[in-house]
Amino acid sequence: MKGSLYPPVTVLYRRTQANYRQDGHTQRVVIQGTVSSLKASILHDDRKPLYHWLQAQDRYIKLELEIITTKHWRELRWADRIRKLRFFSPFVILLYCLFIKGGIFDGRAGWFYAFQRMLAEMLLSLYLLQKDIGSSQEQ
């Protein structure tokens, strides 16, 4: 899909030349040596049932929450700075997925993805607000 937020990732490498580092809710591979771009695309089908996606988002959000609430503003990526504002990120991400990334041209799949990303940002905003008001209601 055109509207996907997935960043480019290294997928073909020698394991003996690679190490991993934690980056929020995912791991990034760090390669010792030369890295080149593929000239062809790789199709990545990550579809899963909605309930499974929701459960995964809850786990991911808690890891992202740690980064957003512990790092200083200057250390945050631009996306995390927007997230820290709480109220804007769900709407920014919806518009970004649809219009900047071109998801509107992916039909229903593009809209579905954009709404998923918006919902994930809303959940993150709710966790941030819960932390702000000092609620100890962990679920």
Image: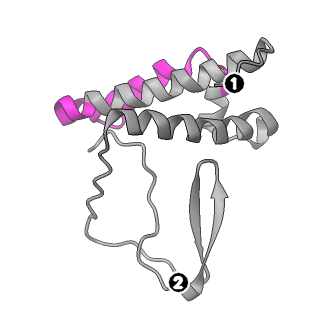
Residue at mark 1? 138
Q: Give left or right: position of 60 versus 99.
A: right
Query: At 71% from the left edge and 18% from the top edge, which residue is drawn?
Result: 137
Verify CB contact (< 8 Å) between mark 2 and mark 1.
Answer: no
The amino acid type, in three-letter code, at marker 1 is: Glu
- Pointer 2: residues within 10 angstroms few (<14), some, or many (20+)? few
Quadrant for the C terminus, please.
top right
Helix, strand or loop at label 1? It is loop
Q: Position of residue 60 (x, y in %)?
A: 57, 41
Residue drawn 66% across and 64% down? 21
Residue lying furthest top:
133
Compared with 106, 25 (above or below) is: below
Residue 74 placement: quadrant:
top right
State the residue at coordinates (20%, 36%): 106
Residue drawn at (34%, 33%), measured in percent from left and top? 50
**Magenta span of residues:** 84-110
* Circle count: 2
Using the rendered view, name the quadrant where residue 28 is placed. Answer: bottom right
Outermost residue, left side: 107
Q: Eyeballing the image, is 29 above or below 88? A: below
Spot occupied by residue 112 in the image (x, y as percentages of width and height): 28, 29
Q: Quadrant of residue 83?
A: top right
Q: Which residue is mark 2?
A: 15
Q: Quadrant of the N terminus?
A: top left
Q: Residue 112 versus residue 33: which sits nearer the camera? A: 112
Between the residue at mark 2 and the residue at mark 1, the CA separation in whole angstroms equals 39 Å
138 in relation to 133, above or below:
below
Q: Callout 2: helix, strand or loop?
A: helix
Q: Which mark is residue 103?
A: none
In the rendered structure, which amino acid carries the disc numbered 2? Arg
Magenta stretch, overall SS: helix
